[in-house]
Amino acid sequence: MDLPVSIPLLAAGLAGGVLVGAAATWLLLATGRIAGISGILAGLLTPVSGDVSWRVAFLAGLVLAPLAHAAILAPPEVAVSASPVLLVAAGLLVGFGTRLGSGCTSGHGVCGLGRRSARSLAAVATFMAAGLATVYATRHLFGG
Amino acid sequence: MRALAALIAGLLFGLGLTLSGMLDPAKVLGFLDLAGAWDPTLAAVLAGAVGVTLAATPLVLRRRSPLFAPSFQLPTRQDIDAPLLLGSALFGVGWGLVGFCPGPALAALSVVPGKASLFVLSMLAGMALHVAWSAWQRRTHRRAHDPGGITPGLTGRP
């Protein structure tokens, strides 16, 4: 099979995924909370006393992690090709959509599927389909 | 203790995302582009992550309580309703436009601060919009059941 990705990159993907799964499992075991990034972040917009510090700590770890990766291995490659206008539009859609839909790739994908939740499976199928359709439209129908 | 545990979880989560290459919107868009040069990496990441949670979550939930909190706080809803599907569809469109979902976008703040913060601030604005919109919905819903408008507390915190 002719893949645009090398086997080591795929193996790194699998290993990184295992780490993500382990992180979500650890958060559940230690704090009893779901590692849904959109939910953890949104909880800070309507703060409840006693429910803030763990959110801030988790998000701080998430933001600092690439620096640790850069120090130990290599600086990560991040290629953002989108224009500022597109970044704003996409950010608004992702922010509103993940709250209306109660979760994102982590909460519904990593955690919800792991809990065998039918709601999460429906959510994952829907955002995957919408993402695929959007990329098809932007790359193959209009321009690209 | 709970915050320290959450910090470790966030670090591990972010390291996993970084190691797998998922901070890079180009790789995410490559996965979503079935008609182009398809990049299967995201499928490998999801398989690794869900493999672990599928196996480990039932074992964790056998416990009476988590290590550093009184109880597990899990979603209880089972119904597949319109907001779930509509919200997920809106999220998927935004995801496909740029290649950022919330986790990688936050982690990317320390790599490409300018572009990532523009996305993250807009995402926060979208979330705040949802807070305001659901508060407005609750008010109009209550008003519909209370035409006299005499129920106290309608103007309070959502």
Image: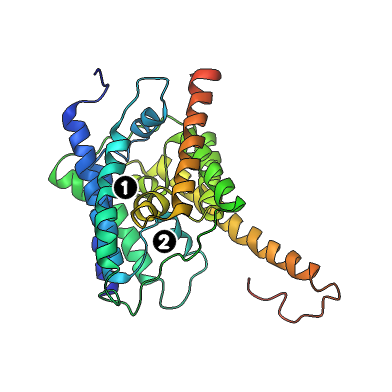
At label 1, which amino acid type do we have? Ser
The label number, if any, that marks residue A40 in the structure image? 2
Q: Position of residue A115 (x, y in %)?
A: 36, 58
A117 displayed left or right of B80? left
Q: Quadrant of residue B89?
A: top right
Q: Is A46 above or below relative to B29?
A: below
Circle 1 Cα neighbour tier, 10 Å, few/some/many (<14 / 14–19 / ≥20): some
Expressed as whole percent of the image width and height from the top left, the position of residue A36 reads: 39, 57
Q: Quadrant of residue B41?
A: top left
Residue at 61 percent of width and 50 percent of height: B82
Per the rendering, the mark at residue A141 is none
**Local SS, label 2:** helix
The residue carrying pointer 2 sits among few (fewer than 14), some (14 to 19) or many (20 or more) residues within 10 Å by Cα, namely many
In the image, A64 versus B91, the foreground residue is: B91
Can residue A17 be seen?
Answer: yes
Picture layout, residue B68 above or below residue A5: below
- Tell me if label 1 and label 2 are in contact, CB under 8 Å: no
* Front in this rendered view, residue B101 or B51: B51
Q: Is residue B55 left or right of residue A96?
A: left
Is disc 2 on the same chain as disc 1? no
Q: How is the image coloured?
A: rainbow
Viewer-side label of 1, 2: 2
**Chain identifier of the residue bearing label 2 in the image:** A
Q: Which residue is mark 1?
A: B110
The residue that appears at 47% across and 65% down in the rendered structure is A43
Residue B39 image point, x, y percent: 32, 27
Nearest the viewer among A132 and A95 is A132
Mark 1, secondary structure of its residue: helix
Disc 2 residue type (three-letter): Ile
Q: Residue at x 29, y 63 (%)?
A: B58
Q: Farthest residue toward the left?
A: A72
